Amino acid sequence: EYEYAGIYVRNQMPLLGERLTAEQMDKYMGEILEECPQFFPALFYRGKYLLNIGKVSQAVKLYDRGFELMIEILEREELVDAVDDIIDGLEKILRYDLCCQYLKRLVKLFPNKGLYHDYLAGDVFQSKKGSVSEAIALQKKALELEPENATFLNNLGWIHLEAGNLKDAEISLKKALDIRPDYESAAGNMDALKYLKKKKNGGIFLDFLLRPVDREKLQKLKDEEEYEALDPLCADYNASRLEAFKRTMLDGYDYQPHQISNLAETLHLFLSFVDDVLNEG
């Protein structure tokens, strides 16, 4: 554990030279596992690296082993934090299928833990084999366990919003904001809902992500040098387009998830570079 932490800190804050490459980090993780085969963080790190380069079968074996060890070793509260990190990492590389696989096991092991039902609902919805009805049922189960959980209410609203169930989405989002008036995620989903309600035939969340750019508003903010409002608005448009790109590629094209996430990361870096150049100018 000490060696793993040292490598991680060294890579995040290199005092001399450049950060370690992904290949170098993977090599170090392999060395740690030779000394301590049960050190599951290294198993997950290597697994994610292998997923990113398309070696799925090898990666899944490491994830399976790491998951078993994690459940065996960690206390319940420690397990929650670890699961959060692992699921977040898999979602970033669009492996919703693997998220579902592991979360379904957790739901069976801990049927009264609303958080696992909540996580599973979102990943079921975003996976190719999932369904809206299954996701809604899982989210409602999470709320049955924790009725006043604003996050669960927001996520139910988001699923309805994604599916185009605007009335149901509004009910859940309003409840979430009643509980947490400063809840930014719910407020953002409510903004998307308001946009879709203005459309003649409603729509789904993807329509919001692909909404036309308000160039007149952008130009006005630029002319008035209102950069504190302009920059976040541009960033929001870019983030929406990137999210739409990932969804469209995952659903409609014959690309592997790691290829799509790598392409999206390249686009993100390019947009950040352009933004930096414009700001310097």
Image: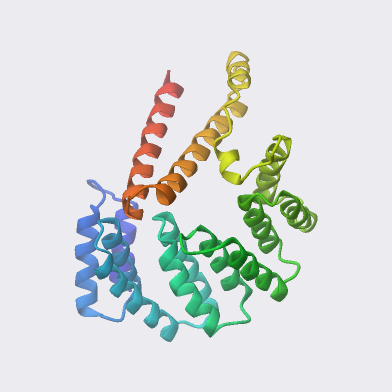
Q: Residue at x 60, y 82 (%)?
A: 111
State whether residue 202 is above or below residue 22: above
Give how far across and how far down residue 199 sits, in percent. 69, 35
29 and 146: which is toward the camera: 146
Q: In the rendered view of the protein, which quadrant contains the C terminus?
A: top left
Q: Residue furthest right?
A: 178
50 and 245: which is toward the camera: 245
234 and 8: which is toward the camera: 234
Judge from the rendering whether residue 36 lies leftward or rightward of residue 208; answer left or right. Answer: left
164 and 41: which is toward the camera: 164
Q: In the rendered view of the protein, which quadrant contains the N terminus?
A: bottom left
State whether residue 217 is above or below residue 12: above
Judge from the rendering whether residue 209 lies leftward or rightward of residue 242; answer left or right. Answer: right
Is there any visible trace of residue 86 in the rendered image? Answer: no
Q: Residue at x 32, y 50 (%)?
A: 255
Is there any visible trace of residue 203 in the rendered image? Answer: yes
Q: Residue at x 30, y 55 (%)?
A: 11
Give how far across and how far down residue 190 sits, in percent. 71, 45
